[in-house]
């Protein structure tokens, strides 16, 4: 700039070569500043469903300090899931109530990142007790379960003499199975460039996240089409028949993915599930509408973990209690007192 000003003071215009040089120097300085800036603000890679119930911060003041990590405290809640073949145990809210409900599902039903007494399956026992139904839930939901494992788990839980009045299945949208298209592939050239340039890494990160989101959305939608839809529908129908043969009622609670509900891309799946349930006379409860009344981020366990938090579990418990009471799915052995439904407390 000083060199240019000296030329201006002499009244001598810049030559074409000098103009190119001046612009090139300016661009080089700008690019250098951008590169330095991106090295400070580059987002870290990570998913939206943490694989473990451990978190780097406690922004909602809900978690305990689990341990001290190399970068500071590690937060979370105690989760006793190492029992037999998995599930969730803790101190029941209604310890004297008989186990008459079986709770199936994956980490959403299990309650990842949520205290045992705040989970929907446990809250349900208190709401039912207030309404005159003396029953509580055995939570056998396990991380990673899909419909295949759900069917097997029900068979295991009823392989002895035990039976249940109600079998609850917290259904998530990947339970029909997903294709491997959701893998986030990165080419060697992208890896090399990302190592050399934070700017390249930033824009590659944004593109990779967008591509992964698109592939994931497509994989979810395709899993509810064609032969896979027919196969998984038959599995649900067969499970329902087994539960009925054992004297119980299967209730499927369809959980949305906690994306932005304003641009929610999975409504088609909820429509498909509604059609399946209506056609085959399955008890289904769709949680999309009651949950989308809230910002999706307000229902997350943590910004790096989009599993439902205790607020979402409370909404699920309330809706389940209302559904079970309205449809009178319990046998007479668990009814403590007769109360008109309009006076029952399920809030």
Image (cartoon, grey):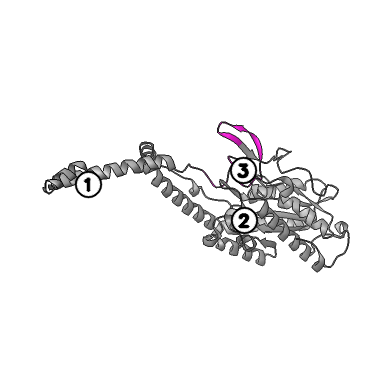
| Label 2 close to label 3 by CB (< 8 Å) | no
Q: 40 above or below 332?
A: above
Residue beneath label 1, please? 23
From this viewpoint, is residue 139 visible?
Answer: no
Q: Secondary structure at mark 3?
A: loop
Badge 2 or badge 3: first in the primary sequence: 3
Q: Nearer the viewer, mark 2 or mark 3?
A: 3
Q: CA distance from mark 2 to mark 3?
A: 39 Å
Residue beneath label 2, please? 232
Say which quarter of the image contains residue 331: bottom right
Say left or right for 324 vs 2: right
Q: CA distance from mark 2 to mark 1?
A: 62 Å
Badge 2 or badge 1: first in the primary sequence: 1
Badge 3 or badge 1: first in the primary sequence: 1
From this viewpoint, is residue 31 visible?
Answer: yes
Q: Which residues are magenta?
A: 45-73
Residue at image x 48%, y 42%? 45
Q: Position of residue 73 (x, y in %)?
A: 61, 35
Pick the quarter of the image with the N terminus. Answer: top left
Residue 246: in magenta span: no
Q: Position of residue 164 (x, y in %)?
A: 80, 53
Q: Residues within 10 Å of mark 1 (few under 14, many from 20)?
A: few
Residue beneath label 3, please? 58
């Amino acid at each position: 700039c000083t060199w240019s000003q000296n030329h201006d003071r002499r009244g001598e215009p810049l030559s074409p070569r000098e103009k190119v040089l001046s612009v090139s120097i300016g661009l080089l300085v700008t690019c250098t500043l951008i590169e330095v800036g991106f090295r400070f603000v580059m987002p870290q890679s990570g998913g939206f469903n943490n694989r473990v119930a451990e978190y780097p911060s406690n922004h909602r003041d809900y978690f305990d300090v689990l341990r001290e990590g190399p970068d500071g405290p590690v937060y979370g809640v105690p989760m006793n899931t190492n029992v037999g073949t998995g599930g969730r145990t803790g101190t029941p809210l209604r310890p004297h109530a008989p186990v008459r409900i079986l709770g199936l599902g994956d980490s959403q039903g299990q309650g990842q990142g949520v205290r045992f007494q705040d989970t929907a399956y446990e809250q349900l026992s208190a709401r039912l007790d207030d309404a005159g139904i003396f029953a509580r839930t055995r939570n056998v939901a396990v991380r990673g379960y899909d419909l295949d494992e759900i069917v097997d788990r029900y068979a295991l839980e009823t392989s002895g003499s035990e039976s249940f009045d109600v079998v609850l299945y917290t259904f998530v949208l990947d339970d029909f199975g997903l294709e491997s298209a959701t893998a986030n592939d990165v080419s060697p050239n992208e890896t090399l460039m990302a190592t050399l340039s934070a700017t390249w890494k930033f824009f590659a990160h944004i593109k990779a996240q967008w591509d992964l989101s698109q592939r994931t959305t497509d994989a979810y939608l395709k899993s509810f089409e064609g032969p896979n839809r027919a196969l998984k529908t038959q599995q649900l129908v067969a499970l329902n028949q087994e539960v009925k043969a054992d004297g119980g009622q299967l209730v499927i609670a369809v959980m949305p993915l906690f994306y932005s509900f304003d641009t929610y891309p999975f409504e088609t799946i909820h429509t498909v599930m509604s059609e399946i349930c209506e056609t085959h006379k399955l008890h289904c409860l769709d949680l999309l509408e009651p949950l989308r009344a809230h910002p999706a981020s307000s229902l997350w366990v943590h910004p790096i973990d989009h599993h439902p938090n205790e607020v979402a579990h409370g909404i699920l418990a309330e809706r389940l209690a209302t559904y079970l009471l309205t449809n009178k799915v319990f046998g007479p052995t668990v009814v403590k007192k007769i109360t008109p439904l309009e006076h029952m407390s399920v809030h």
